[in-house]
Image (cartoon, grey):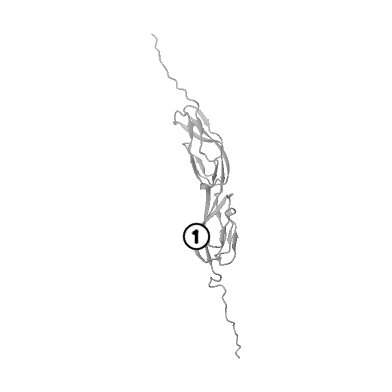
């Protein structure tokens, strides 16, 4: 008596592991969460993940599910590679080598003190920033006589009209910035010379009499 058994053999190609949305550049304070992607993965059961070479950027962790997650904390460049393995079936897969350049969070500000004085030179004040700008703007419109250079961002002029205290939003655009621009709010007013009640005080001459 002969018995015949039919077996079906299913062949899977060796899975590959990748993190296609991993950022190559980011800023300190950015929150990052990237899921692993597999090709031809028959089952997620029994998977383990390790950093096989290099090191993750400071603030990032590799979870048991292979997710790269965290908040970037330190300026620097990191390269790393992730290994995924199936301990049940006995295979491993290595991701490509990834790099992330972490830089300071971009900022913009101006350093002036006190109000503008009517008919007196104000500035010039250059912007203080840590990126390469492509242009500058301000809203609302500055008081008459003051201007902002749209190329260099230099603020200055001679105010010609009294103006109450207002908040002005200065914006600089630049390549690679989050949202394409960075803004800073500053308060400006135009006051008359001597509007400070303690300014230009005068006193009558003091006479001293000697009494015998």
Q: Nearer the viewer, residue 162 or 165?
A: 162
Whole-percent x and y of residue 122? Answer: 58, 63
Q: Residue at x 50, y 41 (%)?
A: 61
Residue at the extreme bottom of the image, as rendered? 212
User: How many numbered marks have been drawn onto this rendered protein structure?
Assistant: 1
**Residue 183 versus residue 96 in the image, above or below:** below
Q: Quadrant of the C terminus?
A: bottom right
* Local crowd size for mark 1, using a 10 Å CA cut-off: few (<14), some (14–19), many (≥20): few
Whole-percent x and y of residue 117? Answer: 56, 67
Whole-percent x and y of residue 12? Answer: 47, 25
Q: Residue at x 48, y 34 (%)?
A: 37
Q: Secondary structure at mark 1?
A: strand
Residue at the extreme left of the image, as rendered? 1
Task: Examine the image and state in which quarter residue 54 appears.
Answer: top right
**Residue 138 versus residue 22 in the image, above or below:** below
Residue beneath disc 1: 167
Task: Examine the image and state in which quarter residue 24 appears.
Answer: top right
Q: Quadrant of the N terminus?
A: top left
Residue at the extreme top of the image, as rendered? 1
Whole-percent x and y of residue 58? Answer: 54, 44
Q: Nearer the viewer, residue 205 or 173?
A: 173
């Amino acid at each position: 008596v002969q018995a015949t058994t039919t077996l079906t053999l299913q062949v899977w190609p060796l899975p590959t592991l990748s993190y296609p949305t991993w950022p190559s550049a980011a800023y300190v304070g950015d929150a990052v969460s990237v899921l692993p992607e597999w090709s031809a993965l028959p089952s997620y059961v029994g998977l383990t993940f390790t950093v096989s070479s290099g090191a993750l950027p400071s603030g990032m962790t590799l979870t048991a599910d292979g997710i790269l997650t965290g908040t970037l904390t330190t300026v620097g460049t990191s390269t790393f590679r992730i290994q995924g393995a199936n301990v049940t079936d006995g295979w491993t897969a290595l991701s490509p080598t990834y790099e992330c350049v972490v830089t300071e969070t971009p900022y913009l500000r101006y350093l002036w003190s006190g109000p503008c004085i009517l008919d007196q030179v104000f500035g010039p004040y250059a912007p203080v920033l840590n990126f390469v700008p492509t242009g500058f703007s301000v809203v609302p419109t500055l008081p008459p006589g003051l201007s902002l250079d749209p190329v260099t961002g230099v603020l200055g002029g001679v105010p010609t009209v009294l103006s109450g205290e207002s908040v002005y939003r200065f914006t600089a655009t630049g390549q690679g910035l989050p949202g394409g621009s960075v803004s800073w709010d500053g308060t400006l007013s135009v006051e008359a010379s001597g509007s400070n009640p303690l300014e230009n005080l005068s006193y009558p001459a003091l006479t001293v009499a000697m009494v015998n």
